[in-house]
Image (spheres, rainbow, N blue to C red):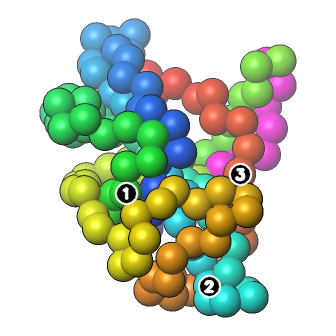
Amino acid sequence: MSQLQVLGWVTADPELKVSAKGNPYARFTVVERVGKRDAARQEYIQAWAFGQLADQLKQAGVKKNSYLWVSGSLELVEYVKKDGITRDKQLKLTLTDWRFAQPQRRQQRPAESVPFPDQTDFGTAEVIDGDRENLPE
């Protein structure tokens, strides 16, 4: 299983829910900058926190535009769109650790017209993004 560390912004308030088996979980997307200057692009990774980590996210006040360092195991999983049809695969990061981080420059969430502040080059990877409607068991 792949391990991944991501430094990026939370794109929307985490959804704190309870699974069918009664376990709390939180789901949110983190956007990071990959590459530098003209070759830079945004990569979106869906993060899942279960149990105590999900509760910690809520108690700490993680919300849209929070800048986080997250770490966990990475899986490529199939997802089902709202229409019930199984689509391609997506990256799912199951958190094992997280913390608030400080951006290296301005503390501003990236937008289409606003470039990310310079960060460490995380290498090159294909952008994988899509509907994220999977629910854990």
- Residue 92 x %, y %: 52, 49
- Which residue corresponds to the image point at 43% horizontal and 25% vertical from the top-left? 15
| Label 3 CA crowd tier, 10 Å (few <14, some 14–19, many 20+) | some
Label 1: which secondary element: strand
| Residue under numbered circle 1 | 67
Q: Disc 1 or 3, which lies upstream in sequence? A: 1
| Residue under numbered circle 2 | 35
- Which residue corresponds to the image point at 25% horizontal and 57% vertical from the top-left? 100
Which quarter of the picture shows residue 3? Answer: bottom left
Instruction: Give the residues drawn in magenta, as a range.
Output: 84-90
Label 2: which secondary element: loop
Label 2, label 1: how far apart the Cα atoms are? 18 Å
Q: Eyeballing the image, is 58 above or below 46? A: above
Quarter in which the C terminus is drawn:
top left
| Label 2 CA crowd tier, 10 Å (few <14, some 14–19, many 20+) | some
Q: Amino acid at mark 1?
A: Tyr
21 with respect to 124 (left or right): left
* Foreground disc of the pair 2, 3: 2
Asked if residue 131 can be seen in this view, the reply is: yes
Q: Disc 2 or 3, which lies upstream in sequence? A: 2
| Residue under numbered circle 3 | 129
